[in-house]
Image: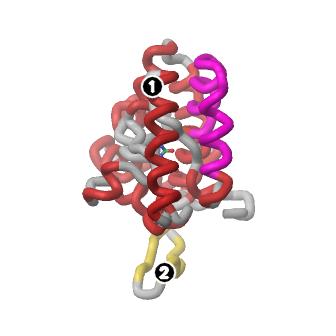
Amino acid sequence: MQAFKSFPKIIIIKMDIATVNELPYEDFVNIFGNVVEKCPIITAAVWSRRPFGSLNALEAEISEFIDALPESGKEGILRCHPDLAGRDLQSGTLTRESREEQARAGMDALSSEEASRMARLNEEYKERFGFPFVICARMNDKANILRQLTERCRSERQVERARGVEEVKKICRVRLQALVLSDAPNKL
Ligand code: 2AL
């Protein structure tokens, strides 16, 4: 185990992979249940694939599980994601992970003009594709998110489904990196 300071007064403990491998099922699901937003069933399924050789191996198991789902399952995962700067943010009902990600990307501090543009584009995207726009907020700033949302509104359904799933995997990686020690230097 290694402790480090993330924010003033908050100590986050990262586990090494050996500790992860020893976790009983309930603890594993409690700790990793939201690495894919509101999809603890993925975590539950992946637990039986341990031991994991590394953080990368754990991530690869999750990716493989997602890739094996039918397209309807992949869309289901996308639908579990809250809109960026959407109703859940306004009403304080985001998951802790999502709240931190959205705040880091400035989604909680949009001008009223930016907020209405975001809301309009999010609705347009959902109407066109039937699932929400998903992007890894930690890897993008506000300007980039708005630009990509605008561009991706004009895309094709299959392209967006695949793109959204790749973004889910990036979000998952960032969330895993916050919990598990990596062998490689952490670039985030
Ligand atoms: C999110 C979210 O909640 N966190 C993140 O990185 N992206 N949602 C979204 N619709 O892209």
Residue 92 shows in this picture? yes
Is 89 within the magenta?
no
**Alpha carbon of mark 2 to alpha carbon of mark 1: how far?**
39 Å
Mark 1 residue crowding within 10 angstroms, few (<14) / some (14–19) / many (20+): few
Q: Which residues are magenta?
A: 145-167
| Residue that numbered label 1 is attached to | 127
Instruction: Tell me: 183 left or right of 112.
Output: right
What is the residue that sits farthest to the bottom in this orientation?
A: 8
| Residue that numbered label 2 is attached to | 7
Residue at 47 percent of width and 68 percent of height:
109
Q: Which mark is residue 187?
A: none
Q: What secondary structure is found at the residue carrying circle 1?
A: helix
Q: What is the quadrant of residue 100 in the picture?
A: bottom left
Is 153 within the magenta?
yes
Give the position of the C terminus as an image quadrant.
bottom right
Q: Estimate the x, y position of residue 41 in percent, counting from the top left.
A: 35, 31
Type of amino acid at the residue the image marks with label 1: Glu
